Image (cartoon, rainbow, N blue to C red):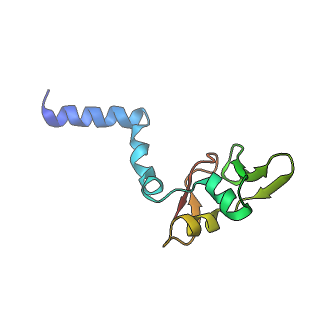
Amino acid sequence: MRLKTKAATLAGALLAMGGGTLALSAPAMAAPGVNMNLACQQQQGSGWEARSGNNVYSWYCIQGFNGFSGVDVSRACRDQNPGTSRAEYSDYNNAYSWYCV
């Protein structure tokens, strides 16, 4: 089998297995991320921790049994990554897919 044919066969197999979609999500990986625990501490004070459910809008801050608050993710981007202005996400169903732009 020629080298070109082998490469085309391998590329086709990767696409069929879903491997071709990996390259499309690169912008989210290249941008700075958000440390949600740090965001809770910066926005609420020491002793606050981040918790999440199963989507990007499920994040909240909690302090023991007494405190509960939402997280301003765009503010967290500005605080943690100077030069960025807002937060975006790459996958609504993945709470960890926030990144800063």
* Residue 49 drawn above or below residue 1: below
Outermost residue, top direction? 1
- Looking at the image, the residue that sits furthest to the front is 46
Residue 93 position in % (x across, y down) = 64, 46
Q: Residue at x 16, y 37 (%)?
A: 4
For residue 76, what is the image quadrant? Answer: bottom right
Image point (73%, 52%), residue name: 47
Query: Which residue is at the front of the view, 97 or 4?
Result: 97
Q: Please state if 66 lies on the left or on the right of 13 as rendered.
A: right
Q: Specify the quadrant of the image occupied by residue 21.
A: top left
Marker count (numbered) = 0
* 61 vs 82: above or below: above
Residue 6 at x, y percent in the picture: 20, 31
Quadrant for residue 71, please give it: bottom right
User: Looking at the rendering, in which quadrant would you find the N terminus?
Assistant: top left
Q: Nearer the viewer, residue 25 or 6?
A: 25
> Which residue is at 55% across, 54% downward?
90
The residue that appears at 70% across and 46% down in the rendered structure is 52
